[in-house]
């Protein structure tokens, strides 16, 4: 499996973006982006990961998983909503499969659309 930097480079190349152009759009130096892509630098701060995801048209959650980091907005939400932690523990303890989690998301989306 590719590491964070390799994925960033692949995404950048797929978007036909140069290193300098990408770094400028993200707000970091080209040298720093180059070190990230070559694995010479640890994955960047969450704000930079989010900006990379936006510039590279990538799913930020995937980049956060690859970086072993967590989106600070998600962490904040978890702290503000203790019921969510109970739900996550239940899903983990009940050993939900991917299909069951997808079904759960679909039920939640249906609940939300009915309330609006």
Image (tube, grey):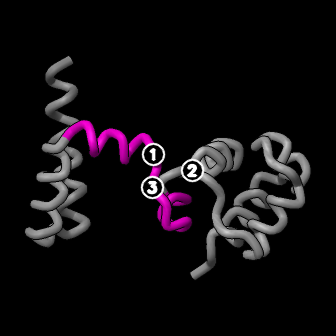
- Locate residue 46, reporting x and y percent: 57, 50
- Locate residue 34, reporting x and y percent: 84, 65
Q: Which of 23/16 is in front?
A: 23
- The residue to which callout 2 is attached is 46
Does the magenta segment cover residue 30? no
Could you tell me which secondary element the residue under label 3 belongs to?
loop
Marks 1 and 2 in Cβ contact (< 8 Å)? yes
- The residue to which callout 1 is attached is 72
Magenta region, residue range: 62-81
Query: Is 53 located above or below residue 97 in the figure?
Result: above
Marks 3 and 1 in Cβ contact (< 8 Å)? yes
Quadrant of residue 10 in the image?
A: bottom right
- The residue to which callout 3 is attached is 70
Could you tell me which secondary element the residue under label 2 belongs to?
helix
Q: Do we see residue 57 in this rendering? A: no
Marks 2 and 3 in Cβ contact (< 8 Å)? yes
Q: Main secondary structure of the magenta part?
A: helix
The numbered mark, 1 or 2, whose residue comes first in the sequence reads 2
């Amino acid at each position: 499996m590719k590491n964070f930097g390799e994925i960033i480079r692949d995404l950048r190349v797929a978007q036909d973006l140069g290193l300098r152009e990408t770094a400028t759009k993200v707000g970091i130096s080209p040298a720093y982006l180059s070190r990230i892509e070559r694995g010479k630098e640890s994955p960047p701060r969450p704000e930079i990961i989010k900006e990379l995801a936006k510039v590279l048209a990538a799913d930020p959650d995937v980049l956060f998983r690859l970086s072993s980091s967590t989106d600070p907005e998600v962490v904040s939400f978890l702290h503000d909503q203790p019921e969510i932690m109970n739900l996550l523990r239940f899903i983990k303890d009940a050993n939900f499969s991917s299909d069951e989690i997808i079904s759960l998301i679909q039920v939640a989306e249906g609940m939300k659309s009915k309330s609006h």
